[in-house]
Amino acid sequence: MHTSLASTHARSRSLLSWRDAELEQLFATLDAGDLPAGTLRGRLFALAGTNWLPRTFNSLLFRLLALPINPWRGKHFDGTQGSNRWLALSGPSFGHYDCSIKTRDGQTLHWLDYSVARNPAWLRGVRGEARQLQNGLWLCRMRWQSDAGLTTLLWFTLEEQPA
């Protein structure tokens, strides 16, 4: 399925008012899809635990987080490894991960495991999960791995950039 970048961006922005449970339901219906490759623009749009806020306020809060005050710009994928990009898509890399495919909710997903030697110890509990929402756009969640299991911390999208 071919989608224009404009419709991809519109789909990404429409998620701003979704609640955690709605995002979980949507995520459970998606499959891993294509392996992300290269540098993708990230858009943070939901923090776990803010569902008590009115939808309008929540949406405004997440629009603020998408402004340049947030230094995270996206992720770079290079086969089975990747890293976060800061300040600019071509900016410094910090927060490295190994990529693999896992199955959850009966569907496959791209698993981003931050438990790698290059990361400081405090970052090694982070896990990312990505499923393709549509061509060129992935719905992702950042999770924390503890002895009690995985806890979702935030939601974001990754979007391919025009060549």
Image (cartoon, rainbow, N blue to C red):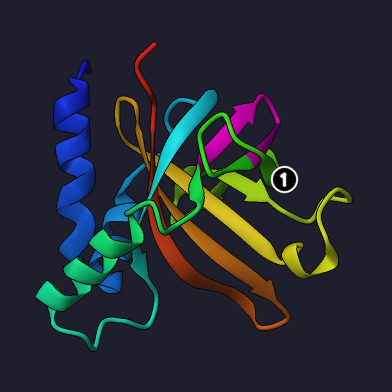
Q: Which residue is mark 1?
A: 96
Compare residues 34 and 85 and report the one nearer the observer: 85
Q: Quadrant of residue 24?
A: bottom left
Q: Residues within 10 Å of mark 1 (few under 14, many from 20)?
A: many
Q: Quadrant of residue 30?
A: top left
Q: Which residue is painted at 77% across and 70% down in the image?
A: 122
Magenta portion: prevailing SS class: strand
Q: Is residue 60 above or below residue 90?
A: below
In this image, 17 relative to 23: left or right?
left
- Which image quarter holds the N terminus? top left
Task: Say which of 135 and 70 sits in front.
Answer: 70
Q: Quadrant of residue 67?
A: bottom left
Specify the quadrant that holds the C terminus: top left
The magenta stretch spans residue 77 = yes
Q: Based on the picture, tell me whether residue 43 belongs to the magenta stretch.
A: no
Above or below, comparing residue 6 to residue 26 in the picture? above
- Disc 1 is placed on an element classified as strand
Magenta residues span 74-83
User: Residue 152, position in %: x, y?
Assistant: 49, 70
**Horizontal and vertical percent for residue 19?**
23, 71
Front-most of 140 and 123?
123
Is 1 placed left or right of 65 in the picture?
Answer: left
